[in-house]
Image (cartoon, grey):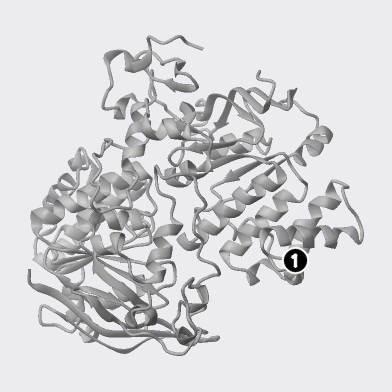
């Protein structure tokens, strides 16, 4: 494992068991995350893109132990945190926080902002008594909410403001890692820019590292240093944002990039239109999971799962087209 | 190109406890034959309400049609009696909605739901209607349509359901298709499929499309002309090239600058400060002035009217009108 890395995920799997459909029948599995490995450097923003159901949110939550992994290991600052006892886990949570997608359902409607943001301080014993309101007020200043509004309830705020409150709640423990799970997709276009800029400012100020989960490729590309593309529970390509944009290797990434609408009516892109829909993660196709929709599929793709390979320096892909490369 | 639909001075208010919401407050637009008019704006700007009002889909009360005239094939859609607007809905004008799951009825088969409009408007028998439904599913690119026609909505994926909605909407060869955020609930690769399908079918049957969306990228892909709405009014209207290359209204310009471009440098995005104001408590003067980077004192006084600044390019901005921009 790399010395400087903050987080290292190795072969992480999360399978969900479904209910039996027949009395004595087997329980089927949803292969939500199926063998994912990556490293996150300190101060880095890693974007995680993919379509709905590809497992990107499950991956984020599994890293935080909000869901227990089925297999694989997670290292945080070089320490194996896969099988932590509840007490140790609590201490760890102060270091890793999450910002949720929906600012309407992720804030308790019966708590004031002071409680929403400040309770974590008490839970972790980082502050108590009179100190809490001061710390909350200081944090609210940072995220651009008036401190006088500390005693207001979530319904008194707009969507963008609620997302700021969610960000304040995540930041107040001064974590090292924040997982942003679709932080702007529920917001209006003009508000998205505010929140994206805020996340950027806070990263610099508090020396944070982010994992940014989003389906909007242009948002991820704007913010991230590196981007991992997920498809059906696996990361199929990982590269710097510039590399991924200019030289996508995996056919799925190529199609995904070409499907993003351009903000210019005169530049009609050559579009790769994929056939069909994402298959169910209950029954992922054999071989390469993308082969039934792939426009470059070869005979081997339906039989053998491709290897994860470093095709170019720091540019990884999982595709038989680049099979001649050294497996890592 | 002939004029297909004209809407004049449409005003729709909602009366709620907090006051009167001027959801649509004096909107004029037209749609020509075979063209795609994009309507873009943020939530609550009145884009959906304007479109739904055309088919009398706004419940009244609490809604109220305060003013407005429309002309579509010699009819004023806003004031047709119920049985006459029913002859237009799903026949001459049809609509597809954002959420393909909730807009299909879960207890009827796909074929049944497509066939209903066909039987109603074309007077075909149930068997003929099912035959036509199979044809429509084939047209929108659903594999194995003969089997699918007997299936229920839950057996289809999101993209397939939206295809079914499009098939249903096109089954009576409408002159106008109103698409209200048709791809917002879909993934980007599926969105590309659906947009291509819509444009392809548009050419085949020469229909007009009214495309409502908040996604500027989708507008750039499909629209011929664009209207930009803010707080129930049109702030800018022009052909798609002018909107993207020569936007005149500060809102349009700031909106375009606030969206991350794929491939652009990771510079700071331009923010539009503040939030969309409450529609029952609008600021005096121009609706946008509290958030506008270029607002002058005069913007607080008078609500600007739409002015034609260049041929076909209309802008509602006091500063632009005075040549101050």
Q: Which residue is depicted at the point 42% across and 77% down?
A: B231
Determine whether A64 is above or below B286 in the image. above
B18 and A196: which is toward the camera: A196
Is residue A280 placed above or below A115 in the rendered structure? above
Numbered disc 1: secondary structure? loop
Residue A5 placement, left or right of A324: right
Residue B311 placement (x, y as % from top left) = 18, 74
* Chain bearing mark 1: A
Locate residue B72, reporting x and y percent: 14, 78
Q: How many marks?
A: 1
Give left or right: position of A97 versus A295. right
**Which residue was labeled with disc 1?**
A112
Percent across and percent down for residue A11 are 58, 21
Residue B178 visible within the image: no
Left or right of A153 on screen, residue B108:
left
Q: Which of the pair B116/B19 is nearer the observer?
A: B19
Say which residue appears at 77% left-offset and 36% top-offset. Answer: A92
Whole-percent x, y for residue A212 in the image: 56, 41
**In the orientation shown, which residue stands out farthest toward the right?**
A129
């Amino acid at each position: 494992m790399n010395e400087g890395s903050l987080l290292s995920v190795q072969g992480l799997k999360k399978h969900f068991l479904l209910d039996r459909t027949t009395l004595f029948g087997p329980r089927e599995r949803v292969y939500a995350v199926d063998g994912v490995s990556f490293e996150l450097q300190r101060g880095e923003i890693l974007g995680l893109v993919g379509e709905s159901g590809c497992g990107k949110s499950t991956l984020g939550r599994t890293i935080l132990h909000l869901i227990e992994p089925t297999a694989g290991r997670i290292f945080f600052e070089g320490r194996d945190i896969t099988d932590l006892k509840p007490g140790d886990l609590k201490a760890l949570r102060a270091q890793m926080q999450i910002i949720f997608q929906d600012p309407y359902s992720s804030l308790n409607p019966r708590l004031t902002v002071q409680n929403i943001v400040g309770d974590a301080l008490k839970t972790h014993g980082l502050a108590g008594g009179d100190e809490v309101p001061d710390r909350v007020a200081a944090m609210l200043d940072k995220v651009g909410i008036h401190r006088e509004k500390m005693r207001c309830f979530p319904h008194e705020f707009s969507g963008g403001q609620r997302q700021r409150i969610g960000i304040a709640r995540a930041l107040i423990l001064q974590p090292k890692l924040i997982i942003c799970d679709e932080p702007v997709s529920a917001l209006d276009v003009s508000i998205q820019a505010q929140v994206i800029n805020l996340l950027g400012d806070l990263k610099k100020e508090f020396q944070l590292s982010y994992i940014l989960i989003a389906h909007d490729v242009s948002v991820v590309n704007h913010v991230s240093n590196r981007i991992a593309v997920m498809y059906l529970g696996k990361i199929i390509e990982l590269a710097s944002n510039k590399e991924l944009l200019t030289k996508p290797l995996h056919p799925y990434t190529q199609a995904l990039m070409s499907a993003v609408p351009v903000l210019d009516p005169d530049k009609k892109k050559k579009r790769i239109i994929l056939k069909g829909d994402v298959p169910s993660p209950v029954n992922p196709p054999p071989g390469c999971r993308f082969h039934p929709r792939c426009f470059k599929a070869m005979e081997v793709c339906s039989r053998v799962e491709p290897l994860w390979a470093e095709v170019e320096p720091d540019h990884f892909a999982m595709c038989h087209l680049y099979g001649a490369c050294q497996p890592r | 190109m002939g004029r297909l639909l004209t809407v004049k001075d449409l005003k729709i208010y909602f009366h709620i406890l907090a006051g009167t919401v001027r959801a649509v407050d004096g909107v004029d637009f037209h749609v020509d034959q075979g063209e795609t008019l994009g309507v873009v704006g943020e939530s609550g700007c009145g884009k959906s309400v304007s479109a739904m009002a055309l088919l009398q889909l706004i419940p009244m009360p609490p809604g109220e049609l305060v003013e407005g005239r429309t002309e579509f094939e010699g009819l004023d859609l806003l004031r047709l009696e119920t049985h006459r607007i029913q002859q237009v809905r799903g026949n001459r004008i049809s609509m597809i909605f954002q959420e393909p799951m909730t807009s299909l009825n879960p207890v009827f088969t796909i074929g049944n739901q497509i066939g209903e409009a066909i039987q109603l408007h074309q007077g075909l028998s149930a068997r003929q209607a099912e035959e036509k439904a199979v044809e429509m599913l084939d047209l929108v690119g659903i594999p194995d349509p003969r089997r699918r026609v007997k299936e229920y909505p839950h057996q289809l994926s999101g993209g397939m359901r939206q295809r079914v909605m499009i098939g249903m909407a096109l089954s009576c060869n409408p002159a106008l298709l109103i698409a209200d955020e048709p791809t917002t609930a879909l993934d980007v690769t599926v969105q590309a499929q659906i947009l291509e399908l819509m444009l392809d079918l548009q050419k085949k049957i020469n229909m007009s499309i009214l495309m409502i969306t908040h996604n500027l990228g989708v507008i750039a892909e499909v629209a011929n002309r664009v209207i930009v709405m803010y707080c129930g009014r049109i702030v800018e209207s022009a052909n798609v090239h002018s909107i993207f290359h020569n936007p005149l209204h500060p809102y349009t310009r700031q909106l375009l600058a606030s969206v991350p471009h794929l491939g652009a440098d990771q510079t700071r995005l331009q923010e539009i400060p503040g939030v969309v104001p409450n529609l029952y408590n609008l600021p005096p003067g121009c609706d946008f002035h509290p958030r506008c980077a270029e607002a002058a004192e005069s913007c607080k006084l008078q609500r600007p009217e739409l002015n034609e600044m260049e041929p076909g390019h209309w802008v509602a901005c006091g500063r632009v009108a005075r040549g101050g921009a």
